[in-house]
Image (spheres, helix red, strand yellow):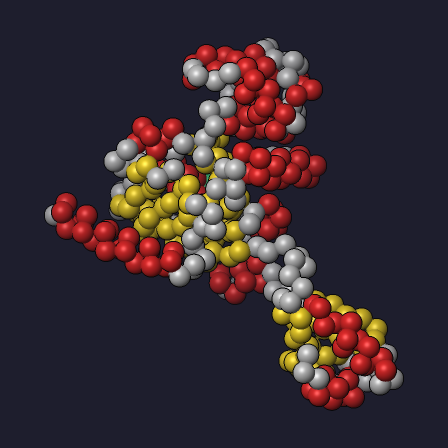
């Protein structure tokens, strides 16, 4: 029976590898430092996480997005080894959580619940205290990680004087001390004000870049994930719903985009668009004076000139962005996150 199970998961792994080779969305761009392979968790006949697979590459921030109860915390608890998996495996820095638990866990830095600190001790002393327990961490490293999370000036203040955001960042500094390959944060922006959220976002980006580590961060807030992550793994009821790459705006001049054009004469404009090789007419409404046109960003000036030269006035050009939110509405039938 156990042997059957092993064979079963091996054949699944072969499929997964093929998907990775094809560059499918679930796979990481850089070297994968965290790999979930058909991870399932059942408790008392209930399936909390159901055959979940995705990867996180070094230097990238991946969002684990899902409504409350989707299974984010359960997934993270399995990754950090707080609870066991019912099926599947997780590899961290190449080591299997099932077979090489100690070395797998060594590559992880994580904050699961609110990190606990001694309030009457300074940030520095808290980190030193932690360092004594961990061993092998230098004071230079403490300064390095403190700078990474913007706490160098506050390092000698008592933790009780820290804001929630500062405490969170001290937690991140602590999690980074032993130079993990993966940083895991479960809803790190919960309870933070907008300024705190923004700071958290900026520091995480800096950490991913400077330390070259993979970051997995969970949230139920869609807009937050779009701003923070390079990829988002969407889960619902413990299952993978979609993986989306978030591309920075305007990064690619030749990227095809859909724009709405508001013009003085939509019918005439439509004829010009149809006659142009650079743009494709996707729709128009003559009444509203509006056209939907697909074209590359680099061709917008030429199209504008062509219309203007023909005596057509342009009131407005606007990109029609299919946001992750639009997609999410489609996937879940309007059951919106947050
Ligand atoms: N120890 C447990 N036993 C039974 N059910 C649990 C346990 N922990 C969580 N759950 C249930 O599993 C589901 C996923 O929970 P969780 O992973 O905490 O979701 P999220 O973090 O996405 O909000 C929820 O329905 C929750 O009630
Ligand atoms: Mg949770």
Above or below for 336 versus 224: below
Residue at 67% of width from left, 64% of height from top?
Answer: 253
Residue at 82% of width from left, 85% of height from top?
Answer: 265
Where residue 173 appears, as percent x and y from the top left, is 55, 25
How many numbered marks appear? Answer: 0
Residue at 23% of width from left, 51% of height from top?
Answer: 10
Of residues 15 and 321, the one nearer the viewer is 15
Residue at 71% of width from left, 68% of height from top?
Answer: 298
Above or below for 238 versus 123: below
Image quadrant in which you'd find residue 299: bottom right
Where residue 246 appears, as percent x and y from the top left, is 57, 55
Of residues 216 and 279, the one nearer the viewer is 279
Where residue 188 appears, as percent x and y from the top left, is 55, 36
Q: Is residue 114 left or right of residue 32?
A: right
Q: Is residue 241 visible?
A: no
Q: Is residue 173 visible?
A: yes
Where residue 177 appears, as percent x and y from the top left, is 50, 23
């Amino acid at each position: 029976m156990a042997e059957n199970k092993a064979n079963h998961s091996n054949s699944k792994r072969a499929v997964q590898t093929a998907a990775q080779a094809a560059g499918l969305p679930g796979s990481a761009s850089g070297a994968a430092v965290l790999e979930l392979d058909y991870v399932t968790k059942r408790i008392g006949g209930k399936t909390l996480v159901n055959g979940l697979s995705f990867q996180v590459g070094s230097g990238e921030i991946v969002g684990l997005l899902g409504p409350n109860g989707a299974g984010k915390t359960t997934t993270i608890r399995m990754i950090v080894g707080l609870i066991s998996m019912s099926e599947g495996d997780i590899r961290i820095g190449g080591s299997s959580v099932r077979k090489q638990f100690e070395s797998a866990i060594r590559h992880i830095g994580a904050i699961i619940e609110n990190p606990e600190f001694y309030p009457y001790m300074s940030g520095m002393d808290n980190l030193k205290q932690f360092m004594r327990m961990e061993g092998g961490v230098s004071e230079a490293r403490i300064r390095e990680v403190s700078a990474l999370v913007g706490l160098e000036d506050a390092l000698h203040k008592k933790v009780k004087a820290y804001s929630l955001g500062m405490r969170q960042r001290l937690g991140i500094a602590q999690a980074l001390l032993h130079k993990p390959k993966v940083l895991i944060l479960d809803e790190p922006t919960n309870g933070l004000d907008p300024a705190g959220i923004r700071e958290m976002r900026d520091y995480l980006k800096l950490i991913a870049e400077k330390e070259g580590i993979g970051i997995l961060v969970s949230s139920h807030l869609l807009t937050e994930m779009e701003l923070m992550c390079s990829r988002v793994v969407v889960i619902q009821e413990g299952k993978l719903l979609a993986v989306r790459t978030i591309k920075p705006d305007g990064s690619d001049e030749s990227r095809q985009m859909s724009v709405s054009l508001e013009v003085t004469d939509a019918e005439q404009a439509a004829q010009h668009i149809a006659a142009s090789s650079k743009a494709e007419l996707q729709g128009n409404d003559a009444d509203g004076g509006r056209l939907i046109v697909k074209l590359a960003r680099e061709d917008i000036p030429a199209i504008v000139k062509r219309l203007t030269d023909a005596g057509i006035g342009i009131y407005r050009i606007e990109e029609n962005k299919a946001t992750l939110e639009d997609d999410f509405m489609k996937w879940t039938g309007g059951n919106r996150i947050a």
